[in-house]
Image (spheres, rainbow, N blue to C red):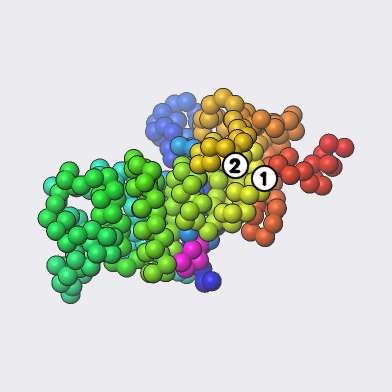
Amino acid sequence: MSTLLEVEHLKVRFRSMGALRALMRRVKDPYIDAVCDVSFRIGRGETLGLVGESGSGKSTIARALMGLIPSHGGSMRFDGTELRGLSQRAYKPVRRDMAMMFQDPVGSLSPRLTVRSLITEPFRIHGVRDRDMDAETRRLLEMVGLPAGFAQRFPHQLSGGQARRVGVARALALDPRLVIADEPTAGLDVSIQGEVMNLLAELQDRLGIGMVVITHNLNVVRHISDQMAVMYLGRFVEQGPTEEVFHRPRHPYTEVLLSANPEPDPDAKLHRVEARGDIPSLAHRPTGCEFHTRCPRARDYCREVAPALSSAAPDHTYTCHFPLEADAKERRLEA
């Protein structure tokens, strides 16, 4: 499978205070690291699921990929083109091939525009004038399973599921090669969530697009993602094939997320693992392993030394001194 998107050692920082205030307080580095040394690749027709608690950096990665915020280190190559350092003018043609679905299905749609105007707006933005907009409207509505009569409706006349379908149609208007979906099932009923995910999976199979799915819902990740990455405080703590990570998680934070996932079988015996305390501030990162303040398996060594990247299987990596399945490294440290 050929590579569509390759990200290496991505770093994104935000200012924590103004230049004058930093000078007065003698702060040499007035920045917060929101994304730290993140690497991944997506092949054509492949989906990567990004999971983690709020504030872990998932949406920051998406905005950096779309050029909505600057990145401060690393590399982002889309179909061989380096995205870091591109001007906004140079980024515009890239955005024809990269589309983003925003989190709020209704709030992300302008209330003053009809569905027809919303889903054909990408053509106007990118100066595509050689298309029949009525025909494109019918094509896109049919693609997402909405009747042609919806073209004249306004967002407030749509249900959450219908608004999400309009968002999907808008994202696919220009036949992109990569779609970034930020919480595609947020605010939707469970039955509607399933419809939306089935729609995305069907369209991906038909069109061969790559996808990045950002979500808190691990059932969504398992349903649609080929690969998944677990984020904590701006870092990937575990990454690998989705079923491999679900069946054989190595990082305790992954175990916490998986154990909190709803279990549809009422007779299943649940093993709940909870993280302790609150998420630390990005401005005051813990020493050593940054998850040690909440980890149910933490030891003194974790508080002192940051874990290196380890491999559990082909393409399955994690950062933990004492992974869920003991290995030679753990036995050496205990000795």
Q: Residue lying farthest front?
A: 267
* 249 sits to left or right of 63: right
Total numbered labels: 2
Q: Where does residue 157 sit, x and y in percent of width and height?
A: 16, 45
CB contact under 8 Å: marks 1 and 2: yes
Q: Can I make out residue 93 in this image?
A: no
User: Which mark, by number, is residue 72?
Assistant: none
What distance separates the C-alpha of mark 1 from that of mark 2?
7 Å
Residue 236 is inside the magenta segment: no
Image point 17% across, 43% down: which residue?
156
Q: Where does residue 172 sit, x and y in percent of width and height?
A: 31, 63
- Mark 2, residues whose alpha carbon is within 10 Å: few (<14), some, or many (≥20)? many
Residue 44 is inside the magenta segment: yes
Q: Look at label 2 and name its amino acid.
A: Thr
Image point 39% across, 50% down: which residue?
194
Q: 150 or 133, which is in the foreground? A: 150
Image quadrant holding the C terminus, namely top right
Q: 303 or 189, which is in the foreground? A: 189
User: Which mark, by number, is residue 254?
Assistant: 2
Q: Is residue 211 above or below residue 162?
A: below
* 288 sits to left or right of 54: right
Q: Where does residue 142 sit, x and y in percent of width and height?
A: 24, 64
Residue range corresponding to the magenta coloring: 42-46
- Mark 1, residues whose alpha carbon is within 10 Å: few (<14), some, or many (≥20)? many
Q: Can I make out residue 314 in this image?
A: yes
User: Could you tell me which secondary element the residue under label 1 belongs to?
Assistant: loop
Image point 83% across, 41% down: which residue?
331
User: Could you tell me which secondary element the residue under label 2 belongs to?
Assistant: helix
Image point 41% across, 34% down: which residue?
19
User: Which mark, by number, is residue 250?
Assistant: 1
